[in-house]
Amino acid sequence: EVQLVESGGDLIQPGGSLRLSCAGSGFTVSSTFMSWVRQAPGKGLEWVSLMHTGGGTYYADSVKGRFTISRDNSKNTLYLQMNSLRAEDTAVYYCARDRMGATGFDYWGQGTLVTVSS
Amino acid sequence: SSELTQPPSVSVSPGQTARITCSGDALPNQYAYWYQQKPGQAPVVVIYKDNERPSGIPERFSGSSSGTTVTLTISGVQAEDEADYYCQSADSSATFRVFGGGTKLTVL
């Protein structure tokens, strides 16, 4: 059974850093595209970042230069390093298996809450 | 980057047909996907590649595409279908993903 479990969300002060983790099971994270998607309180979904199977990375303009997506193949885990955090980064962050051109974001984690506030 | 535009809300009575539209310039060249999200839950894909339905999704959910607009149709709406619905696609380069603003479906 495919599962994604996020962790690492926390209350953090503006300007701080945080690393989110997304542990996969039932499939190999490095063998598929993976994305991070966030949802601010009471707002819609916003795509944040994508990692290709080959290691290529892409970011939404709103986080480019501040966030870094990576993965550890030995741990079957995807990460999102978030630096220079702002109040507007407050959101639930989801990781999702990204099968665009096929079944879309077909598996999602339960989400982890990041709150940026002083 | 590309944008997708959805109506903020749609209301229907039980048993009626709900149609939710999504417009975007890249849609003629990129597949569209639809997600259902209920409060406190992660989204679930209900339509992929414009009009394909994943296993386990009721037959009353269908998708269609025409030019720059895609449509999610829910026939015979049930109370359990009340949720937020998001369309999603990619930009013209198929690199960046984009979501519509979401449509709140209310079952009267």
Image (tube, helix red, strand yellow):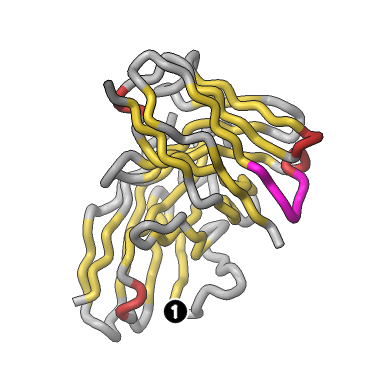
Tell me where residue A49 appears, x and y as whole percent: 54, 31
Tell me where residue A71 appears, x and y as whole percent: 69, 30
**Is residue B19 part of the magenta span, yes or no?**
no
Asked whether, in this view, residue B64 is left or right of residue B38, the answer is right
Residue at the farthest right position: A74
Q: Is residue A21 above or below residue A101?
A: above
Asked whether, in this view, residue A72 is left or right of residue A70, the answer is right
Q: Is residue B98 above or below residue B87?
A: above
Residue assigned mark 1: B60
* Element marked by disc 1: loop
The chain letter for the residue carrying disc 1 is B
**Is residue A24 part of the magenta span, yes or no?**
yes
Q: Is residue A113 above or below residue A15?
A: below
Magenta residues (range): A23-28
Tell me where residue A21 appears, x and y as whole percent: 59, 35
Q: Quadrant of residue B66?
A: bottom left
